[in-house]
């Protein structure tokens, strides 16, 4: 049976919490109770240093508060009591003495050291990545931005599972209205627990339901530092190896973390390739179905004859054939993601090749359709942001449905619908298609073209306050 602390509400809440230890320390005629959570504290420090010293101090009549920098915890309200438990489960040692509760941090939280991000592999850039510890992630960013212009504000989210979130921004660089909006959205979060990155993106976004991501994420500290230098606000969440960046637009989601470490001419070509690949992965299947099934007169005769010969004997229409092959490749992609990394990529590639060849020989699909589907899937692999990948996948299916029903009219209608929807989205008030909607020539060129370092604006320079020298 657990030792009683003298606080009934505390003892009742810890019923059946076997990992919480309540221990009485006796020295002479004085005694106090200690409470801590196994696995979250430095038990060697506790048993070899703190407990023996406490026994000596109790026996000799020493003042414990003067020996340890104890923090007094209020427990006169429900919220205050929840904070007591938050301290307990954060690696603090609780002291119960004279009716008061005080805490002292001896945390030794389980975790891992910074290592390369599995979602954003580095070729020429740094190899460190974010981990699940908030203070380590803050240190990784602070190591890159060594200036007091970097501001850090802490918030506590969750009414039951209290979890810390940090708001980071550059004073004098980030727009004040974005910082104020970030504070307001964090203050409006009233939920029992934060369960994952998707929940954070939904709560911080401008819309509760949005097909395209309104918040970007990153797993590399250099990406976070670059976003801060460019005026974005960054959110760090405890127990998450990802950080969240706002505001974003469509073209910032296409940026690769390696762009800052590659030659400018190569990055310019890669940016254009990503834009073309984004358009292709959304519209190519629908365009091909609308042309091959409805408007065959738009296809050059040599290509048309090749398509007709390849489709001889197929039991399904071009639309169903496209749906079948897209679904098949999506299954292989999902299987490759869920399997261990060493096996997953092999299954995805080899499985797609083998089954695709078998489908052609069995008469379920044509070589032409397999090429179109392969180009579509490979184009989607250029997307770094997985939330954007999911949105593109859904949009591809919707465009295909429009083209299946209305042919080329459906293709142009779907294209207009996608552009209209993208133009209506905002992230922290920033238009999603900026700088193309509304159009800004200089920003549009910088979005698509990477200039050499000596022609760009150069590194970040903090704003200096205007002052007079020499009393002039």
Image (cartoon, grey):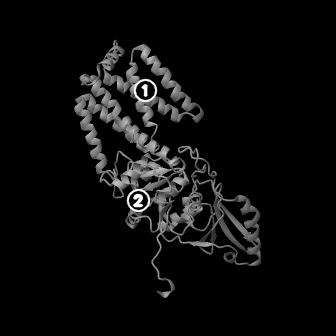
Check the image and report above or below for 127 versus 372: below
Circle 2 SS class: loop
Check the image and report above or below for 75 versus 405: below
- Could you say where residue 156 lies in the image, as x and y percent from the top left? 48, 62
Quadrant of res 292: top left
Mark yes or no: residue 206 visible.
no
Circle 1 SS class: helix
- Could you say where residue 265 lies in the image, as x and y percent from the top left? 48, 45
Q: 94 or 122, which is in the foreground?
A: 122
Numbered label attached to residue 328: 1
Q: Name the residue: 74% across, 78% down.
A: 61
Q: Give the left or right position of residue 472, taking residue 405 as reference.
A: right
Check the image and report above or below for 440 versus 97: above
Numbered label attached to residue 229: none
Q: Give the left or right position of residue 30, taking residue 212 as reference.
A: right
Q: Residue furthest top?
A: 313
N-terminal-most mark, 2 or 1: 2
Q: 152 or 160, which is in the foreground?
A: 152
Q: Give the left or right position of residue 399, taking residue 270 as reference.
A: left
Between marks 2 and 1 in the image, the one whose residue lies nearer the viewer: 1
Label 2 and label 1: CA atoms lie apart by: 41 Å
Mark yes or no: residue 142 visible.
yes
Q: Which residue is mark 2?
A: 190
- Could you say where residue 415 lies in the image, as x and y percent from the top left? 28, 39
- Could you say where residue 346 lies in the image, as x and y percent from the top left? 56, 29
């Amino acid at each position: 049976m657990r030792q009683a602390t003298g606080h009934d509400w505390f003892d009742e809440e810890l019923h059946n919490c076997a990992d919480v230890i309540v221990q009485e320390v006796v020295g002479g005629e004085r005694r106090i109770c200690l409470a801590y959570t196994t696995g979250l504290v430095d038990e060697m420090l506790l048993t070899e240093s703190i407990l023996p010293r406490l026994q000596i101090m109790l026996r000799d009549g020493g003042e414990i508060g003067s020996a340890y920098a104890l923090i007094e915890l209020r427990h006169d309200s429900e919220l205050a009591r929840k904070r007591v438990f938050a301290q307990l489960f954060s690696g603090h040692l609780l002291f119960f003495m004279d009716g008061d509760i005080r805490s002292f941090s001896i945390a030794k939280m389980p975790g891992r050291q910074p290592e390369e991000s599995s979602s954003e592999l580095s070729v020429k850039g740094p190899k460190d990545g974010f981990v699940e510890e908030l203070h380590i992630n803050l240190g990784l960013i602070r190591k890159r931005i060594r200036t007091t212009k970097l501001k850090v504000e802490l918030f506590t989210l969750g009414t039951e599972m209290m979890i810390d979130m940090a708001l980071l921004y550059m004073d004098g660089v980030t727009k004040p209205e974005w910082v104020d909006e970030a504070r307001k959205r964090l203050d409006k979060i009233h939920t029992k627990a934060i369960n994952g990155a998707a929940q954070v993106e939904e709560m911080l976004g401008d819309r509760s339901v949005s097909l395209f991501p309104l918040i970007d994420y990153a797993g590399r500290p250099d990406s976070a530092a670059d976003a801060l230098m460019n005026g974005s606000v960054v959110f760090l969440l405890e127990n998450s190896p990802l950080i969240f960046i706002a505001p974003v637009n469509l073209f910032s989601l296409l940026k690769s973390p390696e762009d800052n470490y590659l030659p400018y001419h190569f990055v310019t070509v890669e940016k254009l390739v990503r834009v073309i690949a984004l358009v292709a992965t959304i519209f190519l299947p629908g365009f091909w179905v609308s042309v091959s099934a409805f408007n065959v007169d738009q296809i050059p005769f040599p290509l048309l004859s090749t398509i007709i010969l390849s489709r001889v004997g197929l039991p399904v229409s071009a639309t169903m054939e496209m749906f079948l092959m897209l679904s098949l490749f999506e299954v292989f992609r999902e299987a490759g993601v869920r399997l261990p990394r060493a096996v997953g990529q092999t299954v995805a590639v080899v499985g797609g090749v083998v089954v695709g060849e078998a489908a052609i020989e069995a008469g379920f699909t044509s070589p032409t359709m397999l090429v179109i589907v392969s180009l579509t899937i490979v184009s989607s692999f250029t997307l770094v942001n997985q939330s954007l990948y999911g949105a593109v996948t859904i949009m591809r299916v919707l465009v295909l449905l429009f083209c299946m029903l209305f042919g080329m009219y459906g293709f142009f209608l779907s294209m207009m619908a996608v552009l209209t929807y993208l133009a209506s989205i905002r992230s922290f008030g920033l238009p999603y298609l900026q700088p193309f909607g509304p159009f800004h020539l200089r920003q549009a060129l910088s979005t698509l073209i990477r200039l050499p370092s000596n022609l760009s604006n150069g590194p970040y320079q903090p704003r200096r306050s205007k002052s007079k020298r020499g009393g002039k």
